[in-house]
Every structure is written in structure tokens, then in C-alpha cells.
Image (tube, coloured by chain):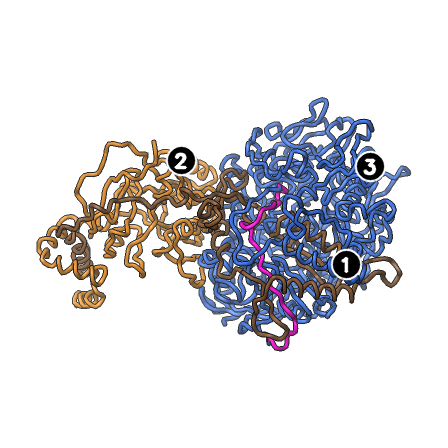
Chain colours: A blue, B brown, C orange
Amino acid sequence: MTNHWVDIKNADLIFVMGGNPAEAHPCGFKWVIEAKKNRKAKLVVVDPRFNRTASVADFYAPVRSGSDIAFLGGVINYLIVNDKIHHEYVKAYTNAGLLVDAGYKFEDGIFSGYNEEKRSYGKDSWKYQMDTEGYAKVDDTWQDPNCVWQLMKTHYSRYTPEMVARICGTPKEAFLKICAMIAETAAPTKTMTSLYALGWTEHSVGSQNIRCMAIIQLLLGNMGMAGGGINALRGHANVQGITDFALYAQNLPGYLGAPGDADADLKTFLEKRTPKAMRPGQMNYGQNFPKWFISLQKAWWGDAANKDNDFAYDYLPKLAGASDVLSIFDQMYQGKINGFFCQGFNPLASVANKRKVGDALAKLKYLVVIDPLATDTSEFWKPYGEFNEVDPAKIQTEVFRLPANLFAEHAGSFTNSGRVIQWRWKAVDGPGDAKDDAEILAALFLRLKEAYVKEGGAFADPILKLTWAYRQPAKPSPEELMMEYNGKALADVTDPKDPTKVLVKAGDQLGSFAQLRDDGSTTCGNWIYCGVWSPAGNNSARRDPSDPSGLGQTLNWGYAWPVNRRILYNRASADLSGKPWDAKRMVLRWTGKAWGGNDVPDMRPDAAPEENVMPFIMNPEGVGRLFCRDLMADGPMPEHYEPFETPLDANPMHPNNPKATSNPAARVFKGDMEAFGKAKDFPYVATTYRLTEHFHYWTKQSKINAIMQPEQFVEIGEELAKEKGIVAGDKVKIRSNRGFIRAVAVVTKRIKALDVDGRKVHTVGIPTHFGFKGATKPGFITNTLTPVVGDANVQTPEYKAFLVNIEKA
Amino acid sequence: MNITRRQFFKVCSAGLGGSSIALMGFSPTAALAEVRTFKLARATETRNTCPYCSVSCGVLIYSTGDKSKNAPGEIIHIEGDPDNPVNRGTLCPKGAGLRDMVQSANRLKWPEVREAGSNEWKRISWDEALDRVARHMKKDRDANFMAQNKDGVTVNRWSSTGFLASSAASNEAGYLTVKMLRALGMTSIDTQARI
Amino acid sequence: MALQSLDIKQRSATTSPTPQARITLEVAKLIDVSACIGCKACTVACMEWNDVREEVGNCHGVYDNPVDLTENAWTVMRFSEVEQNDKLEWLIRKDGCMHCADPGCLKACPAPGAIVQYSNGIVDFHQENCIGCGYCITGCPFNVPRISKKDSKAYKCTLCSDRVAVNQAPACVKACPTGAIQFGSKEDMKDYAEHRITDLRERGYDKAGLYDPEGVGGTHVMYVLHHADQPNLYAGLPANPAISPLVSLWKGFAKPLATLALAGVALGSLFHYVTKGPNEVSKEIEDEIEKEDAK
């Protein structure tokens, strides 16, 4: 979230698309209801189903799953054509006037630089025209045909209301009504908040769905504002924290891009990762990359990371290529992975194409499941009738199941999707011999370390020299770990302007990442968390809920990253002179000497407005990007592509170019392309989703939740039900090209057939949550049906739009 | 008045049992009307965070006893923390039912192994489990660790054992996990953030 | 003023006067259907707090699980898909005891002290006094009480009298994520409802209104409805609920008549109760009478 949960109450319009917060985040959704109650805010929902959020919406419109970019592109076009943009904001705070390389082209659905064989783009032309000083050229009149504004205007001119209706199945009048509601928030004193979740991400164009909203919110001037922003609702209690700590391959903690094979040495690595300002006078905060990285190396390897060995740069593994969950399972399926750990993760249920996942797991030598619960994955080898048809005798995988404690049974911190880090306290002991995750990992690590000491083995240095100064080495405490990742000074940290002034004494905890150094004198395990355990102590445990501004900022509750800032880009909530766009919802203002107000400034505190330091300090341009250069894999501006399993014959935007039917830059593995189904065999659009009564695959283990939703069902509209002779309560069989499940039919008025490109398209809604282990009725795993293809940028699987057939079972 | 004989019969017959008992001098005056006792009166209260979605609602966990050594606490109730600025004491159907998750019949209580080709679980000790897993890891790492790629660039990676990390783990456990996995050279890592 | 619930206003099958001296606040729960998302947090919180669990059932082709009120499910969500004037609405109503000011269950109950109404308005069942006759069901215009198959006692929502007694809101109210359920004095709840109704009317629901039916003397559980003129849309919420005429019959003449005429049977009845459990009309006899009626 750029903003945070409580801030939703400050919005005038809540736009929910690609999410269903009433269903998935009811307690966060309360702030939508509060905005409605207290600000007379309006709630608009766009979704393939009339869902629980829609049940309290002021306006609802249907959309075909997988056509979001067409809808949002239509909104962009509407705002431009009807001149509903916040001109002053767009002019000052976006790259609308920056000039783009003359080589940049978009033709027949394909951007310049496409390599069909590799299914990827060479992005040389996706860049700004630079002047002799190395800054991007600007045309403040926006007249240059190569300026971002003109390119964007042309690009989205194709997204007419008629085209939107044709691709999305959204009635034109409904679309235009929503556009008009959105357009009202172009006024400086009106804001719209965008709430989305997996309904936007789980597509082969997922990242670009969100890029669309970034463009819209910039055009409306809603970024940085109270009640504005783009707010990813997100999944697990600590999905934000675990993402921040980079429990995935391509980053290191704090979103530091991990080294790859092309980064042979530290110098190359740092040069590539450290951006140069693209406009004069901008903060370009990413220039501090070396401070963050070196401090991380110091936190992990202490004295063993020093100037003489490039701060132990070689201790870090270099990434060969893709290493996301889809590619990992593909590697496993090919027999290239021998061992595998599932820590609180149930991939048999949650990863696409269950059969492929099960077959892959069966190729492992060993599988280790660390979990509080008996998961489906831990029993992938066990036959459960047609829910899991396997022969244990043929599966040679050794499976270990290690009991872990749950939230109530240990202390520590979680970071919510509003980036607020909150400490938790232990209530009771876990059952039986269950242990904390950290204790289990420490025990494994110490055993490995001992073995490497005794026996030697492959490159043992990073293991032997890893800092491990915990008072009980086998039981690192959460307090010690938080202090460690916050970081401390190894030598006195002095003020760069006055070296005689000591900011932090050697050995003390650091107060903020501004104190990090790239000379090895500071440690920090995650720069964005620096400050959470400052000299003042554990700030995540702060429990003062006071809210003097009334905006719900609660700056003394927990600790938000970065530096306790609650609204990102908040400098943009004020005009160029530093006066808030909306005095009633003042987030920040220039006091004449410094930035101050109701939040921690997202700006150098003493940067006077005349200095023209722009609000998007992490961008080398300093401004928000309507055109995002070469930063995305599949284009600098979002374009509609059909899902890989589409009910249509072609992309209506590019009917004569089969290469542009689906995302040309999305990755498809060998074998998975063949596993896609065709509309003639599987005529219905399926979409999977969560129910409010359940949480992923956990609460099927909880009796009370099983009572609330006991059994797998699928939802279909009345028209399709009639066609198929299905009545509510019937057992039905749903097939995709990858398998089938059986479920109970829920027949509803809330899913309507849509008129798409001249044909009728039915949607089949399939909740996840169920499986063969749990208190709920034993059943099939929904991901038996889903395809293995991910978003082109982050490989989020396309769970929201694929094809199925349905019949009475 | 439109009532059937059946209903009338039921009225008289059903009503009679109780009131006739009262007539016989069995009036339950001794059984005073009293509300159920408020069960949290002396329970131990602990502040925690709901482990489900990323709203991260504050919860109050009520457990039996007072943390004395001889009476280990058991959770009897969980409700919302009114101080938490986001949920302000409220909980959703998942959070309100947390007690049944903590006390799920499917909680794992001890380490187990399913041997290759076997069709059952076998309970083992922590020492055995950890020793065996660590042995597997070292064997695989030593056999498949890649120090340099084919171009001679130092890559120091171990990609043949993978790790899916939990997005429900604490920041602290997550930090220790990433630190340790990277030190081992692991690159086949992912988390739920992607799905 | 406290929400103290120990003071009894009336008690089933009892004529002795109840304490009247203390002033207690009249409480009410307000369910704003227009803010309800049907998440069932209330249903879960109710089960969790009251230590009851329904059996894990089946999906019946609708979202409604538990499908009905039971002795273990004291509040359930009822989902209605309504299409009128080209507009689809998903009306979701939390169903449960309405805590009537004039409680039909209590009037009908023949077991002394099995049903009480506290001076704050809560109508509570005391199972230790319940004989399981099921007459409260007949007396209830909202079809709320349920007899347990396990102990043959009647159960329903207590409005968390145990929580209210220590000045805490009922479990469902506290849990409700969107604030669709509010709790306080009946007066305050009516004021709050007025605000909500004004807001709904501004949003085009010109028939929005409060459901506090007079037929049962008003209720201590009230609804804000977008379509107050059509309560039936909300899974059959009765437009004009009233206590069954049977209850008046029982109160009027049947009870003394039956008592006098059949007093002699009472002792037998008691022994029957002690040895065989609750007093009830056997299904066979009922069927027999039914057949005769049909002739």
C-alpha cells in the first residue's frame, strides 16, 4: 500500500477492482464503510461477480475476467479526452513532458525491440532522450510528438468506450458512469483510493494492470494524498514483511536486486544497481544503494566482510535466471531439484496445475515440511481417492514433517500491508514438541555448520563465517534478530557535513537508514527496517493509538517503514509551493523552513520548494512515471492482451496479429503451452477466488470455519445453469485441459453472461480453500485446474482467467 | 382464531408438564435466574496479531491460569484488540475463530518421517529428524554446489535444494531464514508473495 | 446507568413480583443491513464466545452455512438475491433472536424461570429450568428458539447477557468488521439508525427505515433496512410480526383449564419427566389427531 488501512476513511471515492476486500479483508474494509458513513464517499466495484463488496457498493459493473487493461485503458482515454486531469499536478509531478527516444514504437500490438524466439523485448528504445549533461529532455508544452503525454494520448486513444464494452462485456453506460465518478476526483480537493489484490495480479498481464492504475492516479493527482494512492491489500499477515525481507530469489532484503551471473564483481554489481539522477537536483534516493548493500554484508558476515574481499561479495550466490515458484516446480518436474522445504506453505494446493506439482514432488529425494498443521503437501504421496490418486510404493521421496508453533505461541513482529510493523507477544506454549520456526532453522544451520567444520565440503566460508552472536545459538530470540536487522554502528558514525559531530556511537543501534555508510562502519540486515529498533528501543511495540490529526495516521502506534512514514510520496499532497492541495486533509506542508505536518515527510526535510526537488524520490526522474521506460518486461505502457486461455479467437485490439493475442513477453515453459485449453473444448471463463469464511488452505483445518463454509462449490449464473440443466445443490464436474474437480453448484443471479466481441461469455467462479486434509468435507484441490503461466514481470500465475467446461456430475 | 386441534393439544399437553410440577410444590424459586458467569474474569490476557490476512488485526488472547509453573495456560478465547488502530476490536470470521485454528485437531505435535515408498508416518525425535535433514542437505550441497559457471564467473550457488518460505512467519524468523539460505548459497527460494 | 442484567422484569410461568427499584438502561442491538457484508464474523464470534459448535454440514447450493438456526448456531446469515427495477441487490440479514419487548416465547413458556426478561430488555433462556416442550417456538413470531437433540433444552441468542452484565458489548457486536452491528441504549440506537436512514435516502433508498415492529412491543434487536417497506425481501422477515394466537389461548383459558382438569395427571407427569426426560407429545399421537382433523 502506498497509504494504509485507516487512511481509506479519507477517500471520496473508493474504487475496487481486482480485489474483494469485504470478502478477503473485512476488518480493513471497515474504513470503506467509515468513509461512506462519515464523508459520504461512494464505493464503486468492478468485478466479474457481484460479490460481497458489491453488496454494499453504490455502483457495480461487471467485467470479463482478464480484460482489466482494456477497462482501465478506457478510463485513461476518458480522462484525457474529457480533460479530467489534475493539470498542475501532472505537469509538475509526472514525466508527461519528458521526451522519449525516437526509436520507440508500438505497432500492431507489439512494442519496439521484440524478439519472438525469446519471447522478450530488447528495450533499447524504451528510454528518454538525454541531453549533454545526462538529463532527460523535457518539453513543458507537451507538444513534442515524442513526449510522454503525446505517446500516452495516442496509445490510449484506441480504448474507446465502444472498445471497452466489446472487450470487457461491461455495458457502455455503466462504464461511462464509472468514468464520470472517477473523473470527479481530478479536483485537487477530491481523492480516489484504489483497492486491489490478486484479482489484478494473478494474470499474465498482472503487473501492467497495476501500472494502469498508477497512470490513472497520477493523472488525477491522487498519489501522496490522504485518501488516495494505490493500495495492494495483500495476502498473509506477514506477506509484506516476508517480501521486504526477500524470501525469494531475485532480491536481497530491502528490495536490493540480487547479483546475477552478469555481475561478476562488487564494482560491476554496485555500478549497475546504483542509479544516476535523470533530472537536475533530484534526490534519486537509490544512489544510496552501496550503503544499504555493504551494511547488509556486514550484518551477515561481520569482520569476514571487509574492503579486502569486496565485503564478501562472493559469499552471495549469483542468480542464474528465473527462480520463482513456477520455475522451481518446473525444474523439480525435470528432475533438477533433489531437496525441498515447505515452511508454512502448501504448494500442492496453492501452486498451479496440481498434477504437475505432485509429479514434481515425487521426483525429490527429500521433502521437509515445517508447518503447524498437517498440510495436503505433506501427504502428496498418500492416496485420497480421486482427490489425490497416487501410489505410495512408487514414490521414493523421504518426507519429514516438523511441527512449528503458531502465532499465539511465540513473540515477534508482523508487517501489515500498510507497512506498519507490529510486535506480538507469546500467549501459550505450542502443542507437544512443536518449536518456533527460528529454532528449527537454527538447529539445522548449526548441524550443517558443525558438519562443515568437521568434514569440510563445498565452499564452507559463508557458512562458517556467518554472524551468529546469539546468546543461545540454538535459539536466537526475536529481540536479538530485530536488533540485528535494524543495524548498529561498528565505528562512530559522523555527520558528513561536520566530521567532528558523532551521530551514533560505535556499538549503538542506528536510528534511521540515513546513518548507514558504505565503508563497513555500519551493519543493517534490511535498510528499510532501519529505525524499528532504534536507541529508543523496540518501536514496533509502541502502542499509543492517539491520532491528533484525525486522519488516522497514529504515528506512535508500531513503526512503519520507511522511517515511520505512513503515506508514501506525501510531498505530492502539496502543490509546488508547499501548500496542501486540500487543507482539510493536510498531510504535509512547507513551513518556511522545513517540511512538516501530519506525517514523516517523504522529502529531504529542508528541501525548500524553490529547489524543485520532486516528490518521487526513489525515481531518478524525481517524478511519477506515466511511461515507465525499460522497467517492465512487457512494455513501457500497459496494453490489453488476452489471457493465455481466452474465449475469443483473437485480441480484439489486434485481430490480425496472432503474436499479440496474449502477452508476447510472458514466459511459458515447454509442455505448459501444450497444456493450454481451447475455447471450443472449454468454452467458459473460470476465475478462482477466496471466500470470507476461509483463509487460503489453513482454515479448512479449523472447525468453526469449516462450519461456516463446509464444502467445495462453484458459482455459475442462472442462464448457464439452465442451459446445462444444473440446479443449485447439484454436484457438478468442472474440467480444464489439466484435470477436473467435482463440487456443489451454487446457481446465482450474481454472475451474468457477458456480451463480449459479439458472443456470449459465461463465467464459472471457483473458490480455492478446499482439499483432502482438514475439518471441511474432503474434496478436490482447485488448482488442479489452473494453468502454468505467469505474469511477464513477476511470474504470478494466471489463476484469474482460464478456460473450463462444466457438466452435471 | 385459527388453530388446529393438533396445536391445541400441544398447548395443553406441553404446558402442563412444567406448570403442574410447579403446582406440586416444585417451583424452582431456588434456581434463581442468573446470567452465565463472565468467563474472562481472571483469564490471562496477551496481545498478539491475527496471523491470517495482511490487515494484521490486533487480537487479545485469553488463556487459563496466571502463567504459574504448574498450570500451563490454554487458550479459552480470542477477541479483537480495541486499541489497534486498524481493527479497533473487530475481527472477521477467520480471526473470530482463531481459537479453533490454534486447537485444530490437525496440529502437528512431533516430528515424523514418511520413508521412501512407505504409506505411513513414523514418529521420530527432533534429533533424528534434524540430523537426517541436515545430512540430506549437506550431501546435496556438496554434490551440486556450483562455484563457477561455464564462463568462469564465480557464482557460488546451490540450486538443487529449494525452499518455500512462509509469509506467515515473523519478520525475525524470515530474516534468520533468508540469512541462512543465502549463506548456504541457495537460489531456489520463493514465498507466497507471488501467489 | 449500568447495563446490569441481573434484575428481572418478567419470568416465565411465575407470578411473583420482580424487583423494580433499580433503574436499568434499556439496551438494543442495531443491525444496519446496508453496511452488512455477510461475512459471518458475528456467527463465528457467537459460537466461539458461547462455546457451542454446530456440526460441519454440507454446501446446499447457497452461501448460507449454517443453513438455519440451531441449538448451536444462535445467529446465522440469510442471503437473498433480489432483482427489482433492473437492479440486483444481495440482501444479507443476520438472523437470530429479536429480544422482543413483549416476548411471545416467555409468555408461552410453561416452565417457571426457564425464560426471563431482564429489566434491560434482554430475553434469556435458562436451560436448567427448561423442560424442552418447545412451546417457546410456537410463541416466537420470528421462529428463533431451537431444541437441542442432545439435552432437549431450548437454546437461542442470549444477547450475550454474560458480557452485557459486565458492561461489554455482545460478542457479535464487538466482532462486526464493518460496524453493521451496533449496541447501546435503545434510544441511542434509534438515533444512530436515523443517521443511517438519512444517508441511505440520500443514496436513493427512499424507503429506507427502521425495523422495530410494534406487534411485539418493539424489539431489542432492530434492523436498518434499505427497503423498510418490504421486510419480506430480507429472507422473509415478517412485515407485521405478532405473537401467535395460540399463546393468548394458552394464557387466556387453556392454561387454567388444563391445570384444573388435569392436575391429577401432574404427578404422573413429573415422574414421566424424571424418568423419561422432557414432556412432549409423541409424534404418533400428533399424527393420529392430524388424521382425524383431516377427516
Which percent across, then down, holds residue C133? 23, 57
Q: Which residue is mark 3?
A: A279
User: Chain ID for label 2?
Assistant: C
| A377 vs A48: above or below | below
Q: Which residue is mark 1?
A: A453
Please, what is the three-letter code of the amino acid marked with disc 3? Arg
Residue mark closest to the camera, 2 vs 1? 1
Which percent across, then down, holds residue C128? 26, 52
In front of the other: A59 or C221: C221
Q: Which residue is mark 2?
A: C194
| A751 vs A675: above or below | above
Q: CA distance from mark 3 to mark 1?
A: 52 Å
The magenta stretch spans residue A403: yes
Q: Residue at x 79, y 61 (%)?
A: A456
The quadrant where residue C285 appears: bottom left
Q: CA distance from mark 2 to mark 3?
A: 55 Å
In front of the other: C3 or B25: B25
Please, what is the three-letter code of the amino acid marked with disc 2? Glu
Task: Provide the residue span drawn in magenta.
Answer: A392-420
The magenta stretch spans residue C187: no
SS at mark 2 in the image? helix
Q: Residue at x 21, y 38 (%)?
A: C18
